[in-house]
Amino acid sequence: MIYLELFLAFFIPNIIGYGGGPAIIPLIEAEVVGHYGWMSAQEFAEILGLGNALPSPIATKMAGYVGYEVAGVGGALVAVFATVVPSLLLMLGALGLLYRHRDSPRVKRLSQWVRPVIAVMMAAMVLNFFHEGLAGAGLVHTLLLATVAAIALLCFKAHPALVVAGALAYGGVMLG
């Protein structure tokens, strides 16, 4: 019964919540604290604070922690599964719909319009990172890191993970 309750506690907020992790956190709190009483509001706030300090989506971290606290490893697996199922079902449905109509001129036009939008979004993200780098590390370090990263990626075909690791090491030594 606890596994079903865990599933519902995380499935319902994720199926009705729109806007990602921050938008569904109050819904999860209503289930975990208000409806089931698995923890106090203070404990939930502490877990939320810790979850925000760690990488990866907040909803899955919250689900894993709460599920583990309530029912151990099995509870963690059920809660995380319930968190990702709504997105998985929606993606599979959308993919099936697009695949079924892949030869449609409308779907082809949609694909043609999505690519430039993604490119603009990626460019905006790069500019945002550049501005944050300028604010945090300064112009010289930012330009040096950007130049070395571009040369490593484009000329030497270095793996991006190695470039990121190198930039982290540089930042730790030179800026730390």
Image: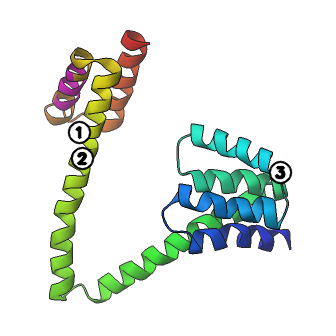
Q: CA distance from mark 2 to mark 3?
A: 40 Å
Disc 1: CA contacts within 10 A as few (<14), some (14-19) or many (>=20): few
- Nearer-the-camera pick, 170 or 152: 170
- Tell me which corner region of the image, top left, top right, bottom left or bottom right, holds residue 81: bottom right
Badge count: 3
Horizontal and vertical percent position of residue 169: 40, 19
Q: Which residues are magenta?
A: 143-150
Disc 3: CA contacts within 10 A as few (<14), some (14-19) or many (>=20): few
Disc 2: CA contacts within 10 A as few (<14), some (14-19) or many (>=20): few
Q: Secondary structure at mark 3?
A: loop
- Residue, disc 2: 124
Instruction: Answer whether labels 1 and 3 touch (C-beta < 8 Å).
Output: no
Residue at screen point 71% across, 59% down: 29
Q: Earlier in the sequence, mark 1 or mark 3?
A: 3
Residue at screen point 72% across, 41% down: 46
User: In the rendered image, which quarter contains the N terminus?
Assistant: bottom right
* Res. 64 visible in picture: yes
Please give the label number shown on residue 127: 1
Predominant secondary structure in magenta? helix
Q: Secondary structure at mark 2?
A: helix
* Residue type indicated by callout 2: Ala
